[in-house]
Amino acid sequence: MLFLLNTTVVDVMVPEARLMSRWRQLGCGDPSDLQAADALDFVEQVMSRHLSTRQILDPDLAMDLAALIITKTGANCMSFAPAQDGGFKARLRDLPSLVLETYRDGSLNAVAEHRQVRRRTAL
């Protein structure tokens, strides 16, 4: 299942299985004990730390967070906007799969173009 986590599209094959195998590494607690609101709060805290320090999100972490949101809410998009208090406010949505596929394909094209430009300038 495709999931848009802020600006990153990840493809989580079996979200429930991924979450059950990686929840300890993720640090969210036992998923069977979590309510949807707990999962949203957890992801918002993790993403706020990354966004405020402008760290690049690890692909495995992105897939783990996506698996948690998918499993607990069924949504396929979680974006973050700056809040008045200096933090970030999460927004959960369900986007058409064609939108996610287009965004993913556009992102892949941008990465490929960036690599070509770097190769040309290195020559």
Image: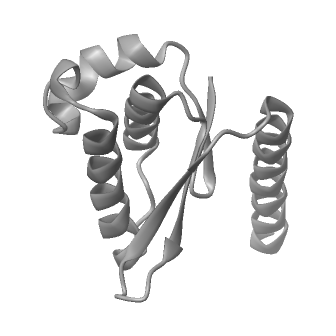
* Residue 87 picture location, percent across and down: 36, 79
**Quadrant the C terminus occupies:** bottom right
Please, which colouring scheme is shown?
Answer: one colour
Nearest to the observer: residue 17 or residue 77: 77
* Residue 55 picture location, percent across and down: 40, 68
Decide: is 8 above or below 18. below
User: Is 29 left or right of 38, judged from the image as shown?
Assistant: left
Residue name at image x 27 percent, y 15 percent = 20
Residue name at image x 26 percent, y 49 percent = 42
* Residue 25 picture location, percent across and down: 18, 32
User: Is 46 left or right of 54, judged from the image as shown?
Assistant: left
Determine the image quadrant of residue 105.
top right
**Quadrant the N terminus occupies:** top right
Decide: is 104 above or below 17. below
Determine the image quadrant of residue 83.
bottom left
Nearest to the observer: residue 118 or residue 86: 86
User: Is 13 left or right of 50, judged from the image as shown?
Assistant: right
Residue name at image x 42 percent, y 23 percent = 71
Nearest to the observer: residue 119 or residue 64: 64
Nearest to the observer: residue 42 or residue 9: 42
Residue name at image x 20 percent, y 18 percent = 32
